[in-house]
Image (cartoon, rainbow, N blue to C red):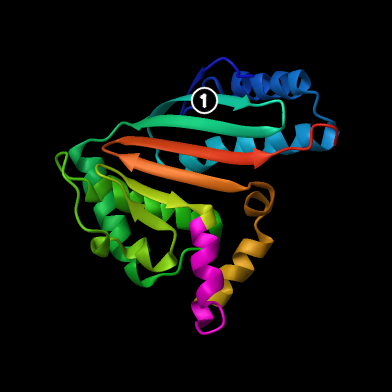
């Protein structure tokens, strides 16, 4: 099952329609009240994450799932970038290099900001130039930067016993509503294109 693709933008256009689609999807999948509520929460967080990070964007949003309850929420956004905005990202990111980001949303925000300004004229720079690398979960494909909640969780848990910062990050994970609901969050940045996929195995009867 798959919802209709809904156009949303940073001004809020289409977001209520997108949430209505998620509720219809939940009904069509036979979700109980708990699963339907969680699906809506994940949809809201998917859009608010990008909205908080990129001031100007337009995006396609949709949700799809299989009869066994495996579902994905997709947001494919185009950041409307120009030279001044890119310079602002560079300046903002440079100031943050010695500041700790708060929460999972802060980590994802850092990742997207770093990726957007590190991709220059269609070329990529090394992940070593990304200050968010220290948080874990970051990887590279041929032409895109990628971040995964699953990989981030693995990296944090691996170092939590020997690193105070990682121990604090693990505590953030345990307190994050989205991190506790979603099975995985995958974010990729290619050029000015941002794709976010939230995966969740729902128990339809709940």
User: Is 77 positioned to the left or the right of 8 in the image?
Assistant: left
Q: Is residue 98 above or below residue 137?
A: below
Whether the magenta-drawn stretch holds residue 80 is answered as no
Quadrant where the N terminus sits is: top right
Give percent across and percent down for residue 156.
52, 69
User: Is 69 positioned to the left or the right of 43 in the image?
Assistant: right
Q: Residue at x 51, y 38 (%)?
A: 197
Instruction: Find residue 99 and report its image quarter.
Output: bottom left
- What residue sits right under mark 1 in the picture? 61
Instruction: Find residue 78 and report its image quarter.
Output: top left
What kind of secondary structure does the magenta stretch mostly adopt?
A: helix
Q: Which residues are magenta?
A: 151-165
Q: Residue at x 82, y 38 (%)?
A: 34
Q: Is residue 197 above or below residue 14?
A: below
Instruction: Find residue 28 and report its image quarter.
Output: top right
How would you rate the neighbour count of disc 1 (Cα within 10 Å): few for under 14, some for 14-19, many for 20 or more?
many
């Amino acid at each position: 099952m798959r919802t209709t693709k809904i156009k949303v933008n940073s001004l809020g256009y289409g977001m209520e329609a997108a949430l209505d689609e998620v509720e219809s999807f939940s009904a069509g999948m036979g979700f109980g009240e708990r699963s339907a509520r969680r699906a809506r929460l994940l949809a809201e967080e998917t859009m608010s994450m990008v909205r908080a990070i990129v001031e100007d964007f337009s995006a396609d949003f949709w949700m799809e799932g299989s009869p066994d309850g495996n579902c994905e929420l997709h947001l494919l956004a185009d950041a409307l970038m120009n030279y001044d905005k890119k310079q602002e990202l560079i300046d903002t990111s440079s100031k943050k290099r010695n500041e700790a980001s708060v929460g999972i949303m802060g980590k994802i925000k850092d990742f997207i900001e770093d990726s957007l300004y590190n991709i220059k004229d269609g070329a990529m720079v090394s992940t070593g130039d990304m200050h968010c690398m220290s948080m874990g979960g970051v990887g590279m494909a041929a032409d895109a930067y990628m971040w995964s909640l699953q990989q981030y969780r693995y990296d944090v848990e691996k170092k939590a016993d020997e690193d105070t910062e990682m121990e604090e990050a693990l505590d953030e994970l345990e307190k994050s509503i989205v991190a506790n609901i979603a099975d995985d969050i995958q974010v990729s940045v290619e050029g000015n294109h941002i794709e976010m996929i939230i995966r969740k195995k729902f128990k339809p009867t709940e």
